[in-house]
Amino acid sequence: MAQATLHGTAADARPPREPWYKVLYIQVLIAIALGVLLGYLHPEWGKSVKWLGDAFIALIKMMIAPIIFCTIVHGIASIGDLKKVGRVGLKALVYFEVVSTLALLIGILVGEVVKPGAGFNADVTKLDGKAVEKYAKLAADDSVTGHIMGLIPKSFFDAFATGDLLQVLLISILTGVVVTGMGQRGEAITHAIDTAGQIFFRIIGLIVKLAPIGAFGAMAFTIGQYGIGKVIDLAWLVGTFYVTAFLFVVVVLGGIARVAGFSIFRFLAFIKDELLIVLGTSSSETVLPHMMTKMRRLGASDSVVGLVIPTGYSFNLDGTNIYMTLATLFLAQAVGADLSIAQYATIILVAMLTSKGASGVTGAGFITLAATLSAIPNNPVPVAAMTLILGVDKFMSECRAITNLIGNGVATVVVSRWEGELDLEKLRQVMENPVSIGTDISDHSPNMDPVAKPSSVAAPIPVAAR
């Protein structure tokens, strides 16, 4: 009888289930479906609501820079050991480069095996490059020197004004290092920055409730502007890219996740809200703050989350890497160009560099593709050939952003485990019921964690598993 009473009390203590129509990811799904319907039935109306998606992304982006700054500064200062900061950063960069290189190679492998551009027989002389001139111009300004100089903002506050993630990372790391060395005065600064970060996270919590409206506007515009017909015309390329990205997530990231001690499918269920928002907006920046909160709830340490997630948005772009090599091969095949081994090597090396600047912004992948094409020796594939895929790039940008997001989430857990700062008990609790624990991304700041604080952390990944 006592046992029954206890069970009854526990059941009664559970919070009432939220009505389905109030669940954010269901609202986003409905909004995406309505957006597709409007864009298909009334293209002009669909294009007219583009501002809804733009406004939502703008609201999110205005908070990204201060959130990254507060998170990284607080993360470095709370570690208190600059050697550890360097160690975590080095591990993250090693992981990023290894997995990013795999993504580039997989794109080339699939392009060579499937040959999505074979038989396209595009006439280079008849291609109108005016539609991609702006991308070619941006790509022409891209160089190693340009990347280095692009890291440095005109002033401390200019990085916040422009929202350049690499510049924000630079000033955040410098500030964190200085605050760490300030002793007791630094502790007061760290506390103030942490408080400011919580304010920014709460603002994001309010903004994200508008995600269904943003997803509706973005999807209605995409279908209204480009139409389903464009996807049908290049279905083989779009389908190949989506299948390749899916296999990369399941096989490559799934294998890495298994070594780290969790299921990739349960992980995807845990971040389903973020995946749907990215699907609707085509930008992974829209969920950056919430991914940081989710990774903490998954058991990753604050210091690792604060360093890996923001850095990964500039250095760990698996979806973009797959797209660049696969799209390059598609265009080469479409115009009948035969690439040499040296040209393949150049594509990989240039893509590894150019992808580092493509954060989570819509259309950044298209600019990096233009830069990659321009750098191939003897230029066998003219940048004007990009007009062949301009109409479907927006449909592929959604897949790029989703794959990038998943890759950064997995990287955070792996680096946290590698560093010996992953709470396995918390990870187990979340993975047992990821859908339930992963709901409601709008009401949690970094310090509002519904799962118990770590009582123990995981041991580092054994050498054999590294």
Image (cartoon, helix red, strand yellow):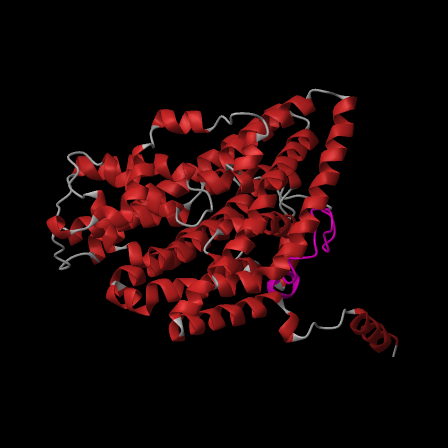
x 70%, y 53%: residue: 444
Q: In the rendered structure, which segment of residues is drawn in magenta?
A: 434-454
186 sits left or right of 85 in the view = right
x 33%, y 67%: residue: 227
343 sits left or right of 204 in the view = left
Pick the front one: 216 or 20: 216
Residue 16 drawn in magenta: no
Quadrant location of residue 415?
top right
Q: Position of residue 218 (x, y in %)?
A: 47, 61
Q: Position of residue 427 (x, y in %)?
A: 62, 53
- What is the tally of numbered marks visible in this picture? 0
Quadrant location of residue 317?
top left
x 24%, y 35%: residue: 375
Q: Position of residue 140 (x, y in %)?
A: 29, 34
x 38%, y 27%: residue: 146
Residue farthest along the right direction in this orientation:
2
Residue 446 drawn in magenta: yes
Pick the front one: 398 or 230: 230
Principal secondary structure, stretch drawn in magenta: loop
4 sits left or right of 32 in the view = right
| Residue 430 in view | yes
193 sits left or right of 363 in the view = right
Q: Position of residue 176 (x, y in %)?
A: 64, 27
With respect to residue 465, does 115 lie above or below?
below
With respect to residue 36, does 205 lie above or below?
above
| Residue 418 in view | no
With respect to residue 40, does 154 lie above or below?
above
Residue farthest along the bottom direction in this orientation:
1
Q: Which quadrant does the N terminus fall into? A: bottom right
